[in-house]
Amino acid sequence: MEVTSLDIGEVLLIRPRRFGDDRGWFEETWNQKSLSNKGLEVDFVQDNQSLSRAIGTVRGLHFQAPPFAQAKLVRVAQGRVLDVAVDIRRSSPSYGKWVSAELSAEGGEQLFVPRGFAHGFITREPDTVVCYKVDGFYDKASEGGIRFDDPDLGIDWGIAPGEAVLSQKDLELGPFRDLPAVFD
């Protein structure tokens, strides 16, 4: 597996090696031993999957507050997304900064989003299926989020204002400036 740090070094782009022939291809999407050898030490406890039917569906920006914080390994099983991670660790030099990567089923890329980051994505193709591993169990009382279109963050989602398909929950998320210090 090829592991590359993005502009915020703790967020990693992982490219599994594919082995193909005339039948298709095979890839190992997670190998604890090989990724541990590259410095990624994480014990995943849960796998999640979502289907987003429409192009322009935004899910996020979400996080789980301590002590139920989660690191995520995100990949696309069908379709394509722009995946975004926002540093919400107040003591971090990259606090309030974001990185993004395009992930696709065709390319097989994965994004590792560590604890202390808000995460979200926007679909670029219809019927997109996103799978992600997390290293902590979901706790409803610990969930939090930030509006995807927060002007202080200035994330370029690649869509015109008002074109995003959002859940009611995501429409009600607050701005970044009102985010409490959940990760110090």
Image: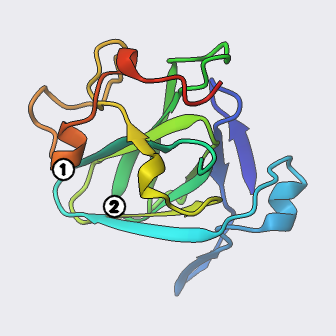
Q: Name the residue under label 2.
A: 79
Please indicate, yes or no, whether residue 56 appears anywhere in the rendered image.
Answer: no
Mark 1 crowd level (few <14, some 14–19, many ≥20, 10 Å Cα): few
Please state which of the two labelled residues, at mark 1 or mark 2, is closer to the viewer: 1
Identify the disc placed on residue 26: none
Circles 1 and 2: CB atoms closer than 8 Å = no
Residue located beneath label 1 in the image? 167
Which of 39/166 is in front?
166
As drawn, 90 above or below 52: above
Real-space CA distance between mark 1 and mark 2, rounded to the nearest whole angstrom: 20 Å
Q: Which amino acid does label 2 sit on?
A: Gly
The front one of 41 and 122 is 41
Question: Three-letter amino acid code at disc 1?
Answer: Ser
Q: Is residue 77 left or right of residue 6?
A: left
Regarding residue 107, the answer to whether it shows in the image is yes
Image quarter for residue 137? bottom right
x and y percent of residue 140 in the render? Answer: 42, 56
Q: Quadrant of the N terminus?
A: bottom right
User: SS for tag 1?
Assistant: loop
Image quarter for residue 16?
bottom right
Q: Is residue 11 left or right of residue 148?
A: right
